[in-house]
Image (cartoon, helix red, strand yellow):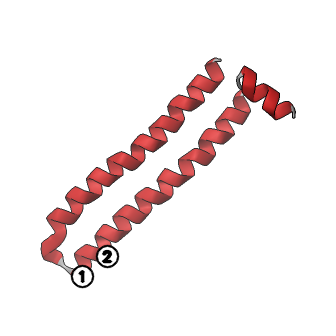
Amino acid sequence: MVLAQEAATGVTNAGLAAIGYGLAAIGPGIGVGLIFSSVISGTARQPEARGVLLSLAWTTFAIVEVLALLGFVVYFLATAA
Protein backbone atom coordinates (compact mmCIF):
# COMPACT_ATOMS: atom_id res chain seq x y z
CA MET A 1 0.00 0.00 0.00
CA VAL A 2 2.82 2.38 0.85
CA LEU A 3 4.54 1.65 -2.47
CA ALA A 4 1.35 2.47 -4.36
CA GLN A 5 1.08 5.80 -2.54
CA GLU A 6 4.71 6.68 -3.32
CA ALA A 7 4.24 5.67 -6.94
CA ALA A 8 1.40 8.16 -7.20
CA THR A 9 3.45 10.98 -5.69
CA GLY A 10 6.78 10.13 -7.36
CA VAL A 11 9.79 8.15 -6.24
CA THR A 12 11.52 9.90 -3.38
CA ASN A 13 14.10 7.18 -2.77
CA ALA A 14 17.03 7.59 -5.15
CA GLY A 15 18.44 4.22 -4.08
CA LEU A 16 15.30 2.45 -5.20
CA ALA A 17 15.49 4.19 -8.57
CA ALA A 18 19.16 3.17 -8.91
CA ILE A 19 18.31 -0.47 -8.21
CA GLY A 20 15.54 -0.27 -10.80
CA TYR A 21 17.93 1.10 -13.40
CA GLY A 22 20.48 -1.58 -12.58
CA LEU A 23 17.87 -4.26 -13.13
CA ALA A 24 16.74 -2.57 -16.34
CA ALA A 25 20.33 -2.58 -17.65
CA ILE A 26 20.65 -6.35 -17.31
CA GLY A 27 18.30 -6.99 -20.24
CA PRO A 28 20.19 -4.92 -22.81
CA GLY A 29 23.48 -6.37 -21.57
CA ILE A 30 22.26 -9.89 -22.20
CA GLY A 31 20.77 -8.81 -25.53
CA VAL A 32 24.05 -7.36 -26.80
CA GLY A 33 25.86 -10.55 -25.84
CA LEU A 34 23.34 -12.67 -27.72
CA ILE A 35 23.50 -10.42 -30.79
CA PHE A 36 27.25 -10.60 -31.19
CA SER A 37 27.49 -14.28 -30.27
CA SER A 38 25.05 -14.98 -33.10
CA VAL A 39 27.18 -12.90 -35.48
CA ILE A 40 30.29 -14.87 -34.51
CA SER A 41 28.44 -18.15 -34.95
CA GLY A 42 26.98 -17.11 -38.30
CA THR A 43 30.33 -15.87 -39.57
CA ALA A 44 31.94 -19.17 -38.61
CA ARG A 45 29.31 -21.03 -40.62
CA GLN A 46 29.21 -18.71 -43.64
CA PRO A 47 32.21 -16.39 -43.87
CA GLU A 48 30.89 -14.72 -47.04
CA ALA A 49 27.85 -13.41 -45.13
CA ARG A 50 30.02 -11.45 -42.68
CA GLY A 51 29.14 -8.00 -44.04
CA VAL A 52 25.40 -8.57 -43.94
CA LEU A 53 25.57 -10.06 -40.45
CA LEU A 54 27.64 -7.20 -39.09
CA SER A 55 25.38 -4.51 -40.51
CA LEU A 56 22.37 -6.25 -38.99
CA ALA A 57 24.23 -6.65 -35.71
CA TRP A 58 25.10 -2.97 -35.44
CA THR A 59 21.51 -1.98 -36.22
CA THR A 60 20.06 -4.25 -33.55
CA PHE A 61 22.83 -3.24 -31.13
CA ALA A 62 21.75 0.39 -31.49
CA ILE A 63 18.11 -0.50 -30.85
CA VAL A 64 18.98 -2.49 -27.73
CA GLU A 65 21.23 0.27 -26.39
CA VAL A 66 18.43 2.80 -26.84
CA LEU A 67 16.44 0.73 -24.36
CA ALA A 68 19.28 0.98 -21.84
CA LEU A 69 19.54 4.74 -22.37
CA LEU A 70 15.78 5.06 -21.97
CA GLY A 71 16.08 3.37 -18.58
CA PHE A 72 18.84 5.83 -17.68
CA VAL A 73 16.59 8.77 -18.56
CA VAL A 74 13.73 7.31 -16.53
CA TYR A 75 16.12 6.96 -13.58
CA PHE A 76 16.97 10.67 -13.74
CA LEU A 77 13.31 11.61 -14.12
CA ALA A 78 12.44 9.50 -11.08
CA THR A 79 15.12 11.08 -8.91
CA ALA A 80 14.36 14.64 -10.05
CA ALA A 81 10.68 14.44 -9.08
Q: Position of residue 25 (x, y in %)?
A: 54, 46
Report if the CB atoms under discs 1 and 2 are less than 8 Å apart: yes
Label 1 sits on residue: 45
Q: Residue furthest right?
A: 1
Residue 51 image-quadrant placement: bottom left
Residue 8 to residue 19: above or below: above
Q: Is residue 12 visible?
A: no
Q: Quadrant of residue 17?
A: top right
Amino acid type of the residue tagged 1 in the rendering: Arg
Q: Where's residue 37, x and y in %?
A: 37, 68
Picture layout, residue 45 above or below residue 61: below
In the rendered image, the quadrant that contains the C terminus is top right
- 74, 44: nearer the viewer: 74
Q: Which mark is residue 55?
A: none
Q: Residue at x 24, y 82 (%)?
A: 45
Q: Which quarter of the rendering shows the N terminus? A: top right
